[in-house]
Image (cartoon, grey):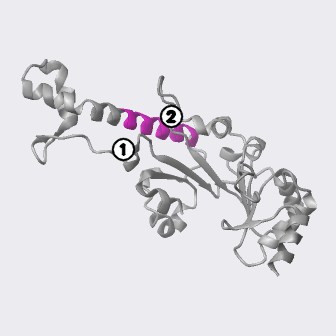
Amino acid sequence: MYKEELGSDLRCIIVSPTFGSNFKLLSELGINREDVFEEPDDDVPAKLIRIADDERDAFLEWKHLDAYYNDFIKTIKGGFFDRSKMDDYMLQYYNPLTNQFERPKPKYKCYLKGKPPVLFTFIDDAQGSKLLSTNKKMLKLCLRHRHLGQFPPPQGGAVGMSLFVSTQTFKSNFGLNKAIRNNSTSIILFKTQDMTELKQISEAFSGEIPVDRFFQLYEQATVKPHDFLFVDLHYKKDIQPSGFRQNFDTYLIADAKKSEETEKSSH
């Protein structure tokens, strides 16, 4: 869905020791091999920070070259320039295939809209690793992921990076660190037989509704195989009827009374 919406403007990074078994599925998403990290404990946080910084630098460099392209061509045609200072620019603008100076092409289409790419990191099958439990660099990254690749003044802002974590355990010693759980903005919950863990999840994500109502919505959402309960903790109340959905596209009314009224009116 993200790829369909953003196309080439999305750069997807995979952190997974089981990437090889899912290679065919993931390769269809156009993921670059250099964006796959199969060792979760191999200083992954530093690599993710570096990716964000590199994308920021590439975007700023393109903006600079694009902005000064017309002046560069004017200077070249005028013949009045300091060769020692212009060599770097010449290399940036020169295309050896056409033997011409050309305006630099954007790495992503979003450059033309004044935006860097969207960075998306998916962490899968990393439970039991230090990355999700005790790695302090990863915990800091989870707290400031929106600020990765910061732009200098006066532009401000940052490239940022969205983090998605897939795990089979939620609150055990091999599950998610508390810092990650507390800073989650949404959760996708599939059918589980572990009622103790389900209770822990309900207490963390029930939000403004009672835990028993959360259980009802969970049962309603996961009736069919592979369906899930989606909980959006940052939903906009003025335009969204609920922060709970069955899968991505069906809202579930969190208020029990409103839900009953809706069902009666639908009949």
In the displayed structure, does residue 188 sit left or right of residue 64?
right
| Stretch in magenta | 44-60
Residue 149 tag number: 2
Residue 2 is situated, as x and y percent measured from the top left of the image, at 53, 59
Residue at label 1? 112
Q: Residue at x 81, y 52 (%)?
A: 171
Q: Is residue 74 left or right of residue 32?
A: left
What residue is at 44 percent from the left and 42 percent from the top?
Answer: 116
- For disc 1, the neighbor class at 10 Å (few under 14, some 14 to 19, many from 20) is few
Residue 122 in view (yes/no):
yes
The label number, if any, that marks residue 264 in the structure image: none
Q: Residue at x 68, y 35 (%)?
A: 136
| Badge nearest the viewer, 2 or 1 | 1
- Closer to the camera in the image, 157 or 145: 157
Magenta-drawn stretch contains 119: no
The secondary structure that most of the magenta stretch takes on is helix
Q: Amino acid at mark 1?
A: Leu
Please state which amino acid type lies under the numbered disc 2.
Gly
Disc 2 secondary structure class: loop
Nearest the eye: 187 or 127: 187
Label whose residue precedes the other's in the sequence (2 or 1): 1
Q: Residue furthest bottom?
A: 267
User: Vertically, is 3 above or below 112?
Assistant: below
Q: Secondary structure at mark 1?
A: helix
> Residue shown at 60%/45% (left/top)?
41
Q: Is residue 9 above or below residue 57?
A: below
